Image (cartoon, rainbow, N blue to C red):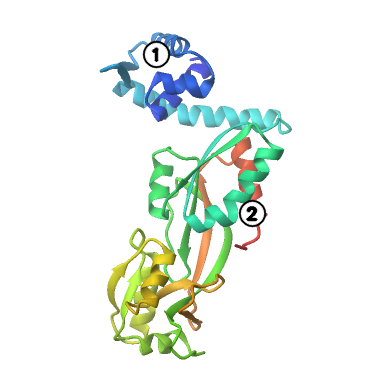
Amino acid sequence: MDVRRLETLLMLSRLGSMRAVADEMYTTTSTISQQIAALSREAGTPLVEPEGRRVRLTPAGRRLAEHAVTILAALEAARLDLDPAAEPAGTLRVAGFGTAIRRSLMPVAAALAVDHPRVRVHIHEHEPTEALALIASDDIDLALTYDFNLAPAPLDRSVTARPLWSAPWALGVPAADPPTDAPAPEVFTRYRDAEWIVNSRGAADEEVVRTIARMAGFEPLVTHRADSLLLLQDLVVAGLGVGLLPADQPTRPGVRLLPLRDPGPVLRTYAVVRAGRTGWPPLALLLNLLQTVPATS
């Protein structure tokens, strides 16, 4: 089968219309239609079928698109092996949580635009569970994820993770509360009757809160859930609860950070890709650049 036609089919499976594929590949819809028709003849079965004024992949087309992912990745790895000095080119689809996008990805994307203009980066904000689901469905090429040392996240063998940076977290409380330098369970004991605020789109920080609270001998009353750390701080200032916040980031007026130790929660970040994909030149370049970015805001 013609490799270019396989690439076209795979792009059609991702973008959903021949017009979108044509725009992405800088060609005409008629050319894309002819390539898919020729690939159908090579496969000996229809790969697309009408759906209103659009088309959709047949079951055979979807299966071939799945095979195309592996075939094209293997071919790209072979090209890299034969020509390691080739200039990287392609579109990288990256999903990650907001802090990692700001700290790590945005500086790298800006550098790529200048130094490697043939590499394009499409950015999507997602929490780790969402980003990993997108990796599994091959809707993105790289996921920027996190877990906590007190709530490690297991990864499927179908993906590979590279550590990036880590950051300690603290307990955000009203600024009027007195400071303390006690072990984390003692700090939590002070707030055993408080309402707690956790993430609304991920369970990692809630697991940390419950782990330390149980060490202190109580179950925390989780009342509020917020995706935004700024909103979490607003809730703290309003006296509506306490919650975990990055210890290395400035806070809004009215919020005090109480350090946590013994144990101290540490957020750990990762660049996650599907196994066998790290040899693709644009992705290899991005991974290497991400590991050079310091963990600063």
Mark 2 surroundings within 10 Å by alpha-carbon count, few (fewer than 14), some (14 through 19), many (20 or more): some
Amino acid, disc 1: Ala
Mark-to-mark CA distance, 2 and 1: 42 Å
Q: Nearer the viewer, residue 14 or 60?
A: 14
Is residue 25 rendered to the left or right of residue 224? right
Residue that numbered label 2 is attached to = 291
When the figure is inspected, residue 59 is found, relative to residue 107, above or below; the finding is above
Q: Is residue 162 visible?
A: no
- Name the residue at 40% across, 10% down: 37
Q: Position of residue 56 (x, y in %)?
A: 31, 22
Q: Position of residue 149 (x, y in %)?
A: 48, 69
Residue 297 location, quadrant = bottom right
Q: Earlier in the sequence, mark 2 or mark 1?
A: 1
When the figure is inspected, residue 268 is found, relative to residue 222, above or below; the finding is above
Residue that numbered label 1 is attached to = 43
Instruction: Label 1, secondary structure: give it.
Output: helix
Q: Nearer the viewer, residue 52 or 33?
A: 52
Instruction: Label 2, secondary structure: give it.
Output: loop
